[in-house]
Amino acid sequence: MEDIIFNKLGYPILTLTTFLPIIGALFILFLRNDALIKWVALITTIAVFIVSLPIYKHFDKTTYKMQFVESHSWIPLWDITYKVGVDGISILFIILTALLSILCVTVSWKAIQNKVKEFFISLLIMETAMIGIFVSLNLLLFYLFWELMLIPMFLLIGVWGGPNRIYAAIKFVLFTLAGSVFMLIGIIVLYYAGGKTFDILALSKVHYPLSLQAWLFLGFFAAFAVKVPMFPVHTWLPDAHTEAPTAGSVILAGILLKMGAYGFLRFSLPIFPDATRAFLVPMIILSITAIIYGAYVTLMQKDLKRLIAYSSVSHMGFVTLGIFTLNKTGLEGGILQMINHGVVTGALFLCVGIIYERTHTRVIEDYGGLSKSVPVYATFFAIFSLAAIGFPGMNAFIGEFLIISGAFKVRTIFGALSIWGVALGVTYMVWLYYRVVLNEVNPRIRHHLSDLDLREIATLTPLVILVFLIGLQPDILLSYMHTSVEHLIEQVNGSAHGQAYNFANLITQYIKEIF
Amino acid sequence: METIIDIRPLLAVLVSAVGALFIIAAGKKPNLREFWSVAAGVLKLAIVVSMVPAILDGKTIEYTLFHLLPGIDIKFKVDSFSILFALGASFLWILTSFYSIGYMRTLNEHAQTRYFACFAVALSTTMGVAFSANLFTMFLFYEGLTIITYPLVGHKDTPEAKAGARKYAIYLLGAAKIFLVAAIILTYNLAGTLEFSKNGLFSSNAISAHPQLLYIIFIFFLFGFAKNAVMPFHGWLPAAMVAPTPVSALLHAVAVVKTGVFTILRVIFFVFGTALMKTLGADMFAITFASFTIVMASVIALSRDNLKARLAFSTISQLSYIVLGAALLTPSGMVGGIIHITNHAFSKITLFFCAGSIYVSSHKTEISQLSGIAKKMPWTMTAFAIASLSMIGVPPVSGFITKWYLVVGALERQSIGVLTVLLASSLLNAAYFGPIIYKAFFEKGNEGDHHYEEIREIPMLVVPLVLTAIGSVILGFYPDFIVRLAKGVIQ
């Protein structure tokens, strides 16, 4: 039985959503007026958002199958097809990408002064690449988008970034490239092992021997772990985040980091189920290390942006923890938390960017007493800080709740340790808020401060709405993923063949193979 | 049991939050602003009172706002326990509003709009806790209360106030994140729901499979709801005394601390259920810690010369009466614990009101300075004496009723230990309240002192505290109503 449902809308909706930004970018190429460029970029991103809306409306939540599928032969010799589709997991990231892209344009309105044209072109190419990754059903197509994303991101950091931008940009590219090389090798091996096809759905139906699975798992893991980023390959992230312009940080935090976790869900779990189960405990331990280590490092940051960046390490630890609990609660929590993290951390970066534009300092010590001089800003910042610490009724609480609930089901100690991570999260976030917003007013920055203008309020308000909407009605997102997640769990557990794999067995087997 | 679906619980919660918006809008006009405070208070009380008849008939009122996950809703449910707590809190809010107006204006405090707005929202969250139908909703409002009272505790904006407020936030948020989140998630994993239920929400399978885990969950709840100030997580309460006195009065005699004991009682009765508490032996754990707190806090209170600090430790001690009573798990013990929520509220708010009245009129904060003050402030000190008698448990003031039920409860349980604790505590209470009253009434004041001659009682402050003192006495003479509500909780 075919696992796909072809697009019935009469027009190629996914292709349109994916490539609309590129069309906007092409248009911008011929413009000279900066103001016009900004408007075209804004209209394009809004158009993408509107064009993507029918996807959610017509999506069938009752099936795990890929929907809105378009398939066109491209290079038949190697079975490279242009095949795109969405299921209950990827669909959510399209809306997130479309939404955050709009906000990236509005927040860059004033912040970007030089090379405006190039900036917005890069931004729009990024959007295509990101949506492309989430809709690809062909491994090579996926890889193509994966690499396409690298160039505009490199430019965003390297051209419009902070003082240390070149170092950060190169570090980012080197880390990511190093990871993707392993993935490329993995893709090629998979092509031959899986019966000469790049079709992701076909590949996930083949059962591979455990040792091959394990090697491939590690290959893909290298690429995904860098992107997430998981401990200990997270060190590019603070630099990239800190140096990137606000829009770049938002995209990094909001979407780029999700690619790695998405990769685990789309490839590692369904294609290498036995290896996934074998590597389960190490993966969970790495995740918890990221949560706790990340939180401690966050605590001692002196730079506003670096602090938020390191908190991403901790938060993404929750995401991978949720994924590798391999139970429905944890997995759904993990996926939801990806969205939540995109919303909340994206919003926090926006907040930092907004205040940086005024004061031109990111040192926490320079701030203080913002609640008195910019009360509207302080209120927005308070809402996002509370959301970040998982205040009940807000979005991150639901995600954390599900993840920790899943972790407790695996082993009590995992749950207990992640609780410790949550408590640390409260500490650094509340302390940050205290130092920046409460405390004494710092006279050095006072005369630079002015409260939010309408454009900035309009940028932050959609995220506030999302924070509460997801927090109070998580079902609007969770209902999309139920069947897909159940199917995913079936895929992981379905191929068990009565064998109990664990990490120790695997190592023994490796040693046998090598000698 | 009949259930009514009605929006009134939500309205009761919202009315003061909406009031807060009016308060902020009227910030520049003090009289209008204070009108909104009082209006919201009266309306809230009216809504709560309107639900009383149905509850006394044995019905419950429910209203579901949001459905989040299977077994997790934002849902309100009014039963007799909710009503008992909500009535006390909303009634005392009105008196506190008047008292606050007098206090804040006489002292010419800054940021009064922030103060009244936060106060109103704090009452909303308190009502939210009272009317919660499940652990999630309760946790939501519980955390909200911590956040919204933070600016109230640190109101004075001095380094000392900030340090106190910080300690307050760290203790409460920290305990909630570390213990409560874990406890709630584990409860959800074991029971599949967070909805309160009369006989507890764990199935017999879960109980027999994970008794140790359940025991740990209970410990997490007991310490996680750190607003109940059971030692060793009591440190926030004395620290929070840097707040203006009306804040201490309402929040640390009624809203915040009572939220702490209310929540843990909800957990004992409606999450675990009395039967499971006994099976696990978790009652012994609670009794031990509560008893220790009762005695220890009283001993510390003895050593404090600052009036508010002594009251703070007295509060810590008295709160554990409530936990102790509930943990006795005998009919009278539980009734004693539950009614003490109201009895202690009326008496302790009187004491705090008096402390504030003394401070505003004479700027005295230490007990050693109070010689002969009763001559100048007869109303205040008489109210103080009445409330002290209630704390000690002397008839006919309301504290006696509590003590009576608790002693009977201890006898029903045949626990000499608890009996000893109750007697020792009564003596200690007498030992730390007695000297204050003696000093105020029978020692000679410094008559030549210019300051002393100028001391005048302020009517705006005295009227509320006289009313609460009278309330204490009425509750002592006519305990029927709240005892009936309390019996409704445990039957």
Image (cartoon, rainbow, N blue to C red):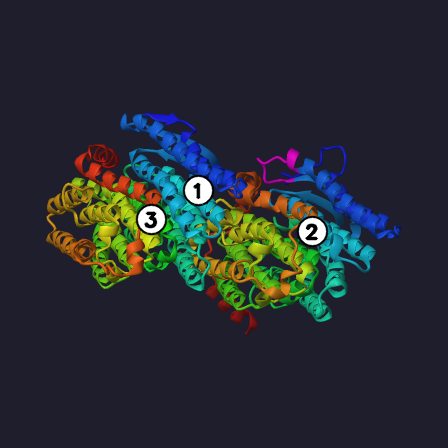
Magenta span has B236? Answer: no
Q: Residues within 10 Å of mark 2 (few under 14, many from 20)?
A: many
In this view, the residue in front, B442 or B189, is B442
* Image spot of residue B150 (x, y percent): 44, 53
Q: Pointer 2 indicates a residue of which chain?
A: A
Q: Name the residue type under label 3.
A: Ala
* Residue type pointed to by label 2: Ile
Left or right: where A246 falls relative to B19:
right
The N terminus of chain A, quarter of image: top right
Q: Secondary structure at mark 3?
A: helix
Judged from the image, the secondary structure of the residue bearing numbered disc 1 is helix
Q: Is residue A61 magenta?
A: yes
The stretch in magenta equals A56-66
Q: Is residue B171 above or below residue B50?
A: below
Res. A136 in view: no
- Look at discs 3 and 2 and give the one toward the viewer: 3
Identify the mark nearer the N-term, 3 or 1: 1
Query: Percent from the top left, x then y, of residue B415?
Result: 12, 51
Which residue in the protein does label 1 denote? B120
Q: Which residue is mark 2?
A: A133
Residue A513 seen in this snapshot: yes
